Amino acid sequence: MSKRWIVVLKVVGHAACLGPVVWLLWLLYLSVTTQPDALGPDPTHTVTFFTGRATLRLLVITLAVTPVRRLIPKLGWLVRFRRMLGLYAFFYACLHLMTYVWLYAGWSWAAMVDDISQRRFIVAGLTAWLMLVPLALTSTSWSIRKLGGKNWNRLHWLTYAAAISGVVHYWWGVKSGVKSPLAITVVLGVLLVARPILAALQSTGRRAQNTAKA
């Protein structure tokens, strides 16, 4: 794919990734101007759920890049968008954390420590965010050069762990019987299974080609 189309697609990608927060800001604007119920009966819950769901969706899309590239080699250019998607996932994760710190805990360290000690879903969510921090900090080309490709790839396996922790956070945070986390759980499960299978098939294919050449 030409550089011109890559630039166009990146602009579209940025717009798509920023779309949720722009929509949320619009709802916030409506809620303080003409439509007090624009964010529903519990605005704090709406904002928290909105940012958390955006985080998980972007994480899953980021993880889907490699399997899609292996299944369809012509889509190899998708790798150029993986870093962008990952950083947007971290951006929404930070917004999600901020809604808790500001709107729920009221910037109170005592309240946060108390919540962490009593609510396991907060522990899972905080764990996911902490795992995303080093990924965001090492997302630059300079970091890749300093760490080396292999070490950088090993570190970025944390993306899977962060996604799993995020899904656990989602399940533990909803009421018993609520199945809204099921869809994202199934998609993540498919990606977790697909990656090693596709890697094994690719390795087998390379060995077969080498044998044929020999």
Image (cartoon, grey):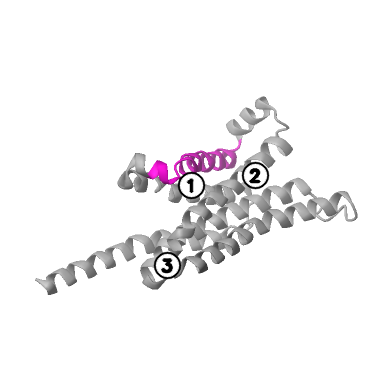
- The quadrant where residue 119 appears: top right
Label 2 crowd bin: few (<14), some (14–19), many (20+), radius 10 Å:
some
Check disc 2 and give the amino acid type: Leu
Which residues make up the magenta segment?
119-144
> Of the residues shown, which amino acid type is indicated by label 3?
Val
Q: Which residue is drawn at 55% across and 61% down?
A: 10
Which dot, 1 or 2, sits closer to the camera? 2
- Say which residue label 1 marks: 162
Q: In which quarter of the image is the N terminus?
A: bottom left
Q: Residue furthest top?
A: 110
Q: Say if 150 sits above or below 114 in the image.
A: below
Q: Residue furthest left?
A: 214
Of residues 145 and 130, the one drawn nearer to the viewer in this rendering? 145
Residue type at mark 1: give it: Ala
Q: Earlier in the sequence, mark 2 or mark 3?
A: 3
Residue at the (44%, 51%) spot, across then down: 160
Whole-percent x, y for residue 141 in the image: 42, 46
Find the distance from the CA under tag 2 to the CA under tag 3.
29 Å
Q: Is residue 189 visible?
A: no
Query: Is residue 165 rendered to the left or right of residue 181?
Result: left
- Asked if residue 203 can be seen in this view, the reply is yes
Q: Which of marks 1 and 2 is nearer the N terminus?
A: 2
Query: Which of pointers 1 and 3 indicates the residue nearer the eye?
Result: 3
In the image, 151 versus 59, the foreground residue is 151
Q: Does the magenta stretch include residue 142?
A: yes
Which residue lies under the disc numbered 2? 95
Do the residues bearing badges 1 and 3 touch, measured as CB atoms within 8 Å? no
Task: Kindly state the secondary structure of the residue where label 2 is placed.
Answer: helix
* First-in-chain label (1 vs 3): 3
Q: Name the residue under label 3.
A: 68
